[in-house]
Amino acid sequence: MTAPAKDIQQAPDAGFGKRPLGKRLVGANTFWIALVLVALIIVFSAIAPGEFATLFTFQTLLIETAVLLVLSVGMTFVIITSGIDLSVGSVLIFSGMVAGKVMEAMSGGNASNAGWGVITVGLLAAVVAGTVWGLVNGFLIAVAGIPPLIVTLGTMGAALGSAYLLNNGSDVRSIPLVLNKTLGYGTSFGVVPNLVIVAVVITLIGAWLLHTTKFGRYTYAVGSNAEGARRAGIGVTAHLLKVYTLTGFLAGIAGFLSLAYYASTTISAHTTDNLNAIAAVVMGGTSLFGGVGTVLGTVIGVFIPAVLKKGFNITHVQDFWQMIAVGAVLIAAVWFDQRRRRRRNSR
C-alpha cells in the first residue's frame, strides 16, 4: 500500500512540478547566472567591439558549445536526481569511435566518399553504443545500488579503454566528407550552423521533457526525496534507469556530432568533457543536492566558459585566467545554492 501523494509535496522542492511553467523555467539561480553571462558579453563587446561583437565570433561560439550542450542536457537530468555521471565524456568518445569504425567497415576501410546510407548506419551505431553504456550505468546504480560516483568513475575508464582498443589507441580519421561539410560545417538560412540547429532541437526537447511532462516531475521528485517519491508510488528504480539511459543516449548523439565537426574521433579533445558538463550544469543553477535545476540554466552555464575563453583570447589575456574565472563562478554557484538550502531549511 502506497502513502498519499502528498508525501512528495513535503519533500524539499518536491512541489516543483506544480509550479507555473514560467517559474519552472526561470528560477532565482538562473536569473543571476544569466546576468553574469550578459555582463561578460557586454564587457568583451565594449573592450573589442570589432572582434568580439561580430557574427563570426557568435557563430563560432555556438558551434564550439553545441556538442557540450547536448552532453549537458543529459547531465542536467542526472544531477537533478541527486546523481552524477563522470562517464559521459568517455561514452562520447566510444560512441564516436564505434560510428567511425562502422562507417569504415561499410566502405571498405575508407569512408571519405561514403554516402548518407552509410552515415545513417553510423549514427545508429553511435546512439546504440551510448545507450548501452547508459543502461549499464543505470542498472548498476538503480538496481545494484552502487553509488553513482563509483559506477560512473569505473565506466569512465572502461568506455575510454574500449574506445582505444577499437582502433589500437589511435583516432579514426576516415570520415565521410559529405557529413563534415553538411553537418559539421554546413549552415542553414545562410548563417545558422547545422550543428547548432541539431543541438538547439535536442535542448528544446530536453526542456520540454523536464519541465512539462510526468517524466520531468518524477525527476524532480526523486532528486528532492527518493524515499518520499517511492512512498507516493513512483518507481524510483525504473526512473533512475531511464535517466541514466537517456544520458547515455545523448552522449551517443554528441559523439556523432563531434565526429561530424572534427572529421575525426579526436580522443584527446574530449577527455575533460565530463567535468565541463558537470561544471556547466552546476553553474547554471542545478543543485548538486538534487531536486532543483533548469535546462535554460544549463544553456547559460555552457556559454559562460565559452564566452570567457573567446573573450580572453581576443583581448590577449592568458588562458590561465579563464580557468580561474570559471572556477570562481562555479564556487559561487555552489555557495548560492547552499545559502538557498539553508534559508529554506531554517523556515
Image (cartoon, helix red, strand yellow):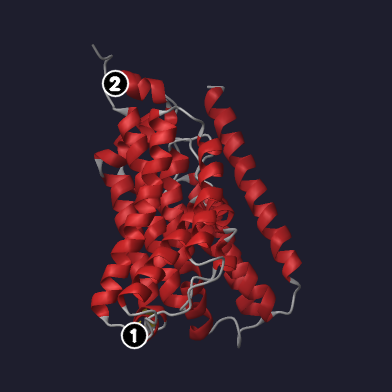
Q: Nearer the viewer, residue 78 or 260?
A: 260
Name the quarter where the N terminus is drawn: top left
Q: Whole-percent x and y of residue 245?
A: 35, 45
Residue 265's tag is none
Residue depicted at x 37% and y 67%: 99
Residue depicted at x 51% and y 42%: 152
- Could you tell me which secondary element the residue under label 2 belongs to? loop
Residue depicted at x 38% and y 85%: 112
Residue annotated with mark 2: 232
Q: Whole-percent x and y of residue 50?
A: 60, 88
Q: Whole-percent x and y of residue 130?
A: 38, 54
Residue 178's tag is 1
Q: Callout 2, which amino acid?
A: Ala
Which quadrant holds residue 123?
bottom left
Residue depicted at x 39% and y 46%: 134
Tell me if mark 1 has few (under 14), some (14-19) or many (20+) residues whose alpha carbon lies within 10 angstroms of its own.
some
Q: In front: mark 1 or mark 2? A: 1
- Could you tell me which secondary element the residue under label 1 belongs to? helix
Q: Callout 1, which amino acid?
A: Val
